[in-house]
Image (cartoon, helix red, strand yellow):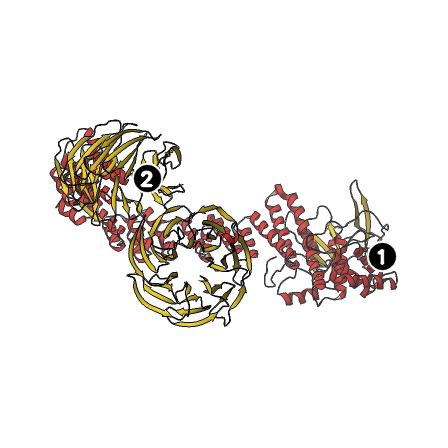
Amino acid sequence: MRAVLTWRDKVEQCIYDLAFKPDGTQLILAAGNRLLVYDTSDGTLLQPLKGHKDTVYCVAYAKDGKRFASGSADKSIIIWTSKLEGILKYTHNDSIQCVSYNPITHQLASCSSSDFGLWSPEQKSVSKHKSSSKITCCSWTNDGQYLALGMSNGVISIRNKNGEEKVKIERPGGSFSPIWSICWNPSREEHNDILAVADWGQKLSFYQLSGKQIGKDRPLNFDPCCISYFTKGEYILVGGSDKQVSLFTKDGVRLGTVGEQNSWVWTCRVKPDSNYVVVGCQDGTISFYQLIFSTVHGLYKDRYAYRDSMTDVIVQHLITEQKVRIKCRELVKKIAIYKNRLAIQLPEKILIYELYSDDSVDMHYRVKEKIVKKFECNLLVVCTDHIILCQEKRLQCLSFSGVKEREWQMESLIRYIKVIGGPAGREGLLVGLKNGQILKIFVDNLFAIVLLKQATAVRCLDMSASRNKLAVVDENDTCLVYDIHTKELLFQEPNANSVAWNTQCEDMLCFSGGGYLNIKASTFPVHQQKLQGFVVGYNGSKIFCLHVFSMSAVEVPQSAPMYQYLDRKMFREAYQIACLGVTDADWRELAMEALEGLEFETAKKAFTRVQDLRYLELISSIEERKKRGETNNDLFLADVFSYQGKFHEAAKLYKRSGHENLALDMYTDLCMFEYAKDFLGSGDPKETKMLITKQADWARNINEPKAAVEMYISAGEHTKAIEISGSHGWVDVLIDIARKLDKAEREPLLMCARYFKKLDSPGYAAETYLKVGDLKSLVQLYVDTKRWDEAFALGEKHPEFKDDIYVPYAQWLAENDRFEEAQKAFHKAGRQGEAVRVLEQLTHNAVVESRFNDAAYYYWMLSMQCLDMAQADPAQKDVMLDKFHHFQHLAELYHGYQTIHRYTEEPFSFDLPETLFNISKFLLHSLTKATPLGISKVNTLFTLAKQSKALGAYKLARHAYDKLRGLQIPARIQKSIELGTLTIRSKPFHDSEELVPLCYRCSTNNPLLNNLGNVCINCRQPFIFSASSYEVLHLVEFYLEEGITDEEAVALIDLEAPRSKREGKWQEIASNNSQTLRLDEAMDAIGDDDPFTAKLSFEQGGSEFVPVVVNRSVLRSMSRRDVLIKRWPPPLQWQYFRSLLPDASITMCPSCFQMFHSEDYELLVLQHACCPYCRRRIDDTGP
């Protein structure tokens, strides 16, 4: 580091303080009772400012540059604008000692001998705080939160923005060590705020904001008057009684002297963001210095070591960009690096470091040796076991222990020295002298070897990798290259300030100068590109460049020298250059040039580098052909030209080598059909057709489908024409092709039909399928397009396609939520399993959704499906009949429960109380076992209880309420049930006789609560209920005598023969397993003519049911209108019922065989236009 005086001025008064404008353009000095404003660029006094009446002790500029303040012995503070106008003045009770602006809020702190004040532009008054001792200096922290005050009693008081003391630091010397100057480090990179303190105990110390001291006190050996940080906080200036300004590191290590003066230095400051320093002295001298920090560094291959912050050494790996910092805590004077060694010269010693390992990227250094001795030298060089000191004309070789082993005295000043390698302990040095002499010295040899001598002084030297050539830069900025062995000057180049050989290529060097980088290969012309700085190394494609203080590795493509070799067809040399580092485009160019020059080995390496498999395959095939004995270079070159796109040249070479067919293939593959036709001339028609087909392929590929279709048709390639037309949706073109094709050409026609179908032209598709005769595909077409009428018509003509039509139809209906129709379609298609599954799902959904009418209907349909399946498959007959009876029973339950559900869930009910009473009683007697899903016993019992109570069946109502007490009751009817349970107790314990059901077979009155269910308690005859009102119908079921067929029975009933005067007689016939009551004709019988109304004798409460069996004569005596027949399909038998009250008409649905009172049935049919149970339409004539 050295200080250069820029300008100096002198005034008559002592310079107590000074301050820079934040932009560095102006300097404000406190001189006497005036302020002096200087231009910092040349030291011109711009303007003196008068305002104070006594000596000005302090001055400070605001960080924003808008105003500055001055304090004087006249006890006043003046605020000035940047235009040098005074705008405000306020006073203290004593003389002003120091002022400081808050860097954030621009609050001004002004300190006097007895107090300090805080003033802000927005405040009208100044808040003042008393001080116990004289305040000599003050400084704000970077964030403007705290103000440090230095006092004459050796105390440092740290206050917040309101003036409240937060930390108090007491220096050991007390009032014998007054604090004379303090300053906070302005660096933003520091984790803590650091306060530098200079006291008249001649100590420099550092403190954290908390008051904790950092490190130990640094002795100064003089009384400090001022302390100041550089803008970034890396250095400290201290001036005082030693009449000079000293430069310290931020840690307090002294680095040197800035400028010696003739009197005490009262103030010194650093110009913002620069290396300029201004010094103010007691004798009125103002000195403005520029500090120049010289570069201390060393380089060996890809490792660069340089000085940082004057006391640290940073080693940088130029390839990996890794850096390591070595803290020396003393001024670093010289650095040398070689292989795994690093030498650092400090003021009193030399440290030798070594790497921990031999790894090329290892960056961990450790101290190997210390030479504790002061040396004066111009240059320092380190070797494996020695250090070399250069002093003027003398070189000294010292061991790492500090022992001088040998010394060389030169004829002239040594200008350049470099280690050029060698065995450990025997390294060679390249030395350049001012007189132009260049020597080679081995550290173990006393005798220097003169390599050559030139007329001009040496500035820079380098030796080529093989040590055959020497490059020298002389004082005239000329680069001279010599052959070491012959001493011959090979060439020279102007404008050079440094030179370096490429360590990986013997014939390449680079030199820098005049803002350009010059690269020279062999004897070719120089290639230039812009580059600032000095070239210090050249390794492969990386050039190491030192610019100002930074070293960088610049990646430089070696394109220019490579092309210079290519121009001379020196492919192998060009490849060597390319290996140092060129772009992919350069590699490709090298590969192509070598390929055209038939230098296949170089071309293969280059194409491998750019990963071009296509050309590598070409080279491989050519090499294989050469191995097989082919020697026609024209043919090889033709292949190369065709790969490169030089088709006409390739065609000429193919023709010249007698391979016209290869040229034709090339043109057709490239769709150059006109060239192919020209090349072919008038040739074979077969080849012409082949050309047309290929031309059509090309037209198709270049998105000219119309032309391609026409060409394919003319070439007879109908399939390809159809593909293109179909993919573009050209229906008109497709139908033209289909109509022109013969029906024997099945595949193209079917392809046309598929495209018609895809393009929503089912008419054309049908026409094409008919032409081919593919009826199955036609059926599939109708199904896919949902043209069901045509499909059904085709199915009528061709029954074998019935499944192909009805199954998809049923699936389509199901997908469109037409499940009932879907079920019928499945049934019609013979898919009974699917039909049953649809119905089961429909039934389940209906129950879950509380649509019990629908559930009843679906269960009835399921039962009929099971009956059909029992008829169709004798093997499943018994199982299916069981299911039939089960589903019939469920249908009856759900049909009745719909009314109960409606009554309990809906707010209004339109059903008669008698109907509700009958249905709930029917369900109560039917639900003796498991209750089906969806049917609520609570709702059933609740309805029965209410209606029984309303109709006078109090005993039954009590039973229902008792049953409800054992069930979980919904909250909505809880109160109603509790009330009903209480009120029913006030009613008689019997049922109304009007409600008691009568058995029409035995005329027995049955109780309302029947333990046997819906059968007579006396004769066990099952009751027949109306499917609407659920009243017991006046019907008695009878059975035919064995041997009478259904047809004969119907014929006998239809006869309606007049009854004879004979009396019938019941005859009881008992067998092992059954008991039968038979009505026989008996002569001389007395009583009624009608056997059904005869007085019949039954044992009360008989345990077995005895059915009524009739013979032929009874059948003949019956009236047709009194008999109802359920004509079940096989395997079920018909059921016969006799009406005992012929005047009360009963209607039976011919489909579901449910019985109704005729007037009820007619009303329901009018309301629903169908049977309320099976939903048979009234206009449906079928059963």
Q: Circle 1: is it few (<14), some (14-19), or many (20+) Cα within 10 Å? A: some
- Tally the marks: 2
Residue labelled with disc 1: 1087
Please tell me which of labels 1 and 2 falls first in the chain: 2
Q: In the picture shown, does residue 404 fall above or below 1020?
A: above
Q: For residue 874, which quarter of the picture?
A: top right
Q: Is residue 1127 left or right of residue 273?
A: right
Q: Position of residue 616 (x, y in %)?
A: 25, 37
For this rendering, which residue is in front, 1071 or 411? 411
**Residue drawn 52% across the image and 67% down it:** 127
Q: Which residue is mark 2?
A: 335
Residue 99: give x, y in percent of width and height: 45, 63
Q: Quadrant of residue 50?
A: bottom left
Q: Is residue 483 visible?
A: no
The quadrant in which the C terminus is found is bottom right
The answer to whether residue 261 is left or right of residue 639 is right
Can residue 426 be seen here? The reply is: yes
The relative height of residue 469 versus residue 196 in the rendered view (above or below) is above
The foreground one among 719 and 199 is: 199
Q: Which is more toward the observer, 289 or 872?
A: 289
